[in-house]
Amino acid sequence: MVDAFLAVLQRPNFLTVVIIFVWGFYIMVTRYNLVKKLIGMYLIQTSVIFFLVSISAKKGATVPILLSTTEPVKSTIYANPLPHVMTLTAIVVGVATLGVGLALCAAIYKKYGSLDEEEIIKKLE
């Protein structure tokens, strides 16, 4: 237990990721306003992006461009490009999802006159 606590203190960015993720999930579950649910979803997406950025950091690493093919490759000196690519993809998907969600909220508001989930369900019944 003490080892886990010390590990969290050494890497506070992972604790921040968990806090932002749980905060966004809490907003999505407890709020009835659709825009607030989108804000919670955006917080979850932001925590995932922050996690990808946190795991991609490597001290003393260089870009993964091989200058010579005759020498053996030492993977410890190169940064892994996959988390960076995943981060860019997550940003693009997050912006697109948020845009579609806001467009849906605008259409729902035009049709039902409210963004409250309970009021919309009452009008549907």
Image (cartoon, rainbow, N blue to C red):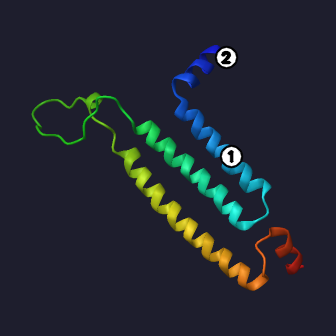
Give the labeled residue for mark 1.
23
The x, y position of residue 54, in whole percent, is 46, 38
Question: Residue 68 lies in what quarter of the image?
Answer: top left
Which sits in the foreground, 119 or 89?
A: 119
The vertical placement of 33 against 41, above or below, is: below
Q: Secondary structure at mark 1?
A: helix
Residue in the picture at 65% in, 62% down = 38
In the visual, does 9 lie left or right of 23?
left
Q: Secondary structure at mark 2?
A: loop
The image quadrant where one finds the N terminus is: top right
Amino acid type assigned to the residue bearing label 1 in the image = Trp
Question: Residue 42 lies in what quarter of the image?
Answer: bottom right
In the visual, does 7 lie left or right of 108?
left
Considering every residue shown, the one lying at the far top of the view is 2
The vertical placement of 36 against 21, above or below, is: below
Question: Residue 20 lies in what quarter of the image?
Answer: top right
Residue in the picture at 58% in, 72% down = 100
- Classify mark 1: residues with Cα within 10 Å, few (<14), some (14-19) or many (20+): some
The x, y position of residue 97, in whole percent, is 56, 66
Amino acid type assigned to the residue bearing label 2 in the image = Met
The vertical placement of 27 against 3, above or below, is: below
The vertical placement of 54 against 60, above or below, is: below
The image quadrant where one finds the C terminus is: bottom right
The x, y position of residue 71, in whole percent, is 12, 30
Give the labeled residue for mark 2.
1
- Foreground mark, 2 or 1, reads 1
